[in-house]
Image (cartoon, grey):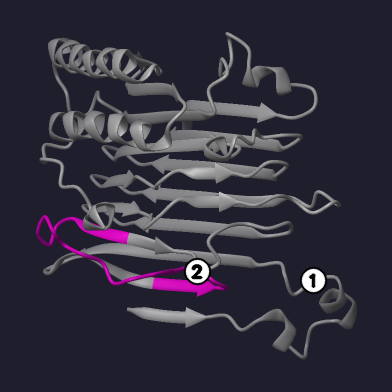
């Protein structure tokens, strides 16, 4: 594995003094670029380039060598004003990678200047490969000012399962999102064409969406799970119907037990589970239950829960 660490800007004598002065020490412009390929030893992490506090441990193989489980590590634990994190995973042909995090991500209260707290996730999945993006929840602190972008590019016969769980404010502490600003995007392209595009903006012009019936309806947790495309792996609409029926049963039972609002739809070749909740842990349990049903039907492998979720 090739580990390359780019040195800190403050230690780079060739940079103009003005640029150094304009980059506060409390800001991180960090990136992590992972490259996976298929070898005789299975799916391996071939390259790992990073700058700043973004790392991974060595891949784990609880399912055997063909499927790599990778844990993203961000030691600061969250984004402050001016931070920009860029996470890229490049999967070569015939690989299978599951990426998760050891704990919740955080976007802290912004400074008075409202400098953006920005995270970009770019997942490039080559032909006949599978990508599972299953991070734990992201907590947006009161008065955060953030943009969170997820971009997935799928080649022919590539497969994707992923979710995003977002907590607005600190409900356990009875603190709402306040005057916070959030922009979230989830975009999937297949062979260069947009297939799924999700976008949520909460600012001073749209803050009412947090309480609106057509918005979050007073729920502080918003989640979406997306899997697809199903056309490449499922030949019968009956399989779709059976799977959707099972998922809707999980959502209905969860709503009855916990007061959540959840639903399932098939948009083109992509299965989408949406949920509004007041408890992020319970939403994760619902999404894990859905993932455990989707995975064997979609990529023909039983779901193996990452060990880090059990600690």
Q: Position of residue 69 (x, y in %)?
A: 25, 58
Residue highlighted by disc 1: 23
Q: Residue at x 73, y 56 (%)?
A: 81
Decide whether residue 126 is among the magenta residues.
no
**Left or right of 101, for residue 23:** right
SS of the residue at dot 2? loop
Q: In the rendered image, which quarter is residue 76 located in?
A: bottom right
Quote the CA–CA distance across marks 1 and 2.
20 Å
Q: Position of residue 136 (x, y in %)?
A: 40, 46
The first of marks 1 and 2 along the sequence is 1
Work out whether residue 192 can be spotted. no
Range drawn in magenta? 48-70
Label 2 neighbour load within 10 Å: few <14, some 14-19, many 20+: few
Q: Is residue 120 above or below residue 274?
A: below
Q: Residue at x 43, y 42 (%)?
A: 153
Residue highlighted by disc 2: 75
Q: Is residue 238 above or below residue 304?
A: above
Q: Nearer the viewer, residue 1 or 79?
A: 79
**Left or right of 268, for residue 209:** right
SS of the residue at dot 1? loop
Q: Position of residue 80 (x, y in %)?
A: 68, 58
């Amino acid at each position: 594995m090739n580990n390359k660490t780019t040195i800190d800007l403050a230690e780079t004598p060739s940079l103009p003094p003005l640029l150094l002065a304009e980059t506060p020490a409390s800001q991180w412009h960090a990136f992590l670029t992972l490259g996976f390929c298929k070898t005789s030893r299975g799916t391996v992490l071939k390259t790992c380039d990073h700058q700043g506090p973004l790392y991974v441990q060595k891949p784990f193989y609880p399912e055997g060598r063909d499927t790599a489980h990778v844990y993203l590590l961000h030691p600061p634990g969250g984004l402050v004003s001016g931070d920009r994190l860029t996470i890229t995973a490049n999967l070569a042909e015939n690989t299978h990678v599951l990426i998760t995090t050891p704990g919740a991500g955080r976007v802290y209260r912004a400074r008075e200047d409202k400098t953006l707290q920005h995270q970009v996730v770019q997942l490039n999945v080559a032909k006949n490969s599978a990508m599972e993006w299953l991070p734990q929840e992201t907590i947006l602190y009161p008065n955060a000012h953030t943009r969170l972008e997820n971009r997935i590019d799928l080649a022919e016969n590539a497969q994707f399962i992923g979710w995003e769980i977002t907590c607005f404010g600190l409900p356990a502490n009875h603190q709402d999102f306040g005057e916070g600003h959030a922009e979230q995007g989830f975009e999937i392209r297949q062979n260069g064409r947009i297939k799924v595009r999700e976008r949520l903006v909460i600012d001073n012009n749209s803050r009412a969406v947090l309480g609106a019936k057509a918005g979050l309806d007073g729920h502080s947790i918003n989640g979406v799970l997306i899997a697809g495309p199903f056309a490449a792996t499922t030949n019968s609409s009956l399989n779709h119907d059976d799977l959707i029926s099972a998922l809707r049963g999980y959502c209905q039972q969860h709503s009855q037990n916990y007061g959540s609002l959840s639903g399932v739809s098939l948009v083109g070749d992509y299965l989408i589970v949406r949920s509004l909740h007041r408890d992020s842990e319970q939403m994760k349990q619902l999404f894990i239950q859905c993932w455990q049903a989707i995975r064997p039907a979609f990529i023909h492998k039983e779901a193996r829960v990452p060990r880090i979720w059990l600690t």
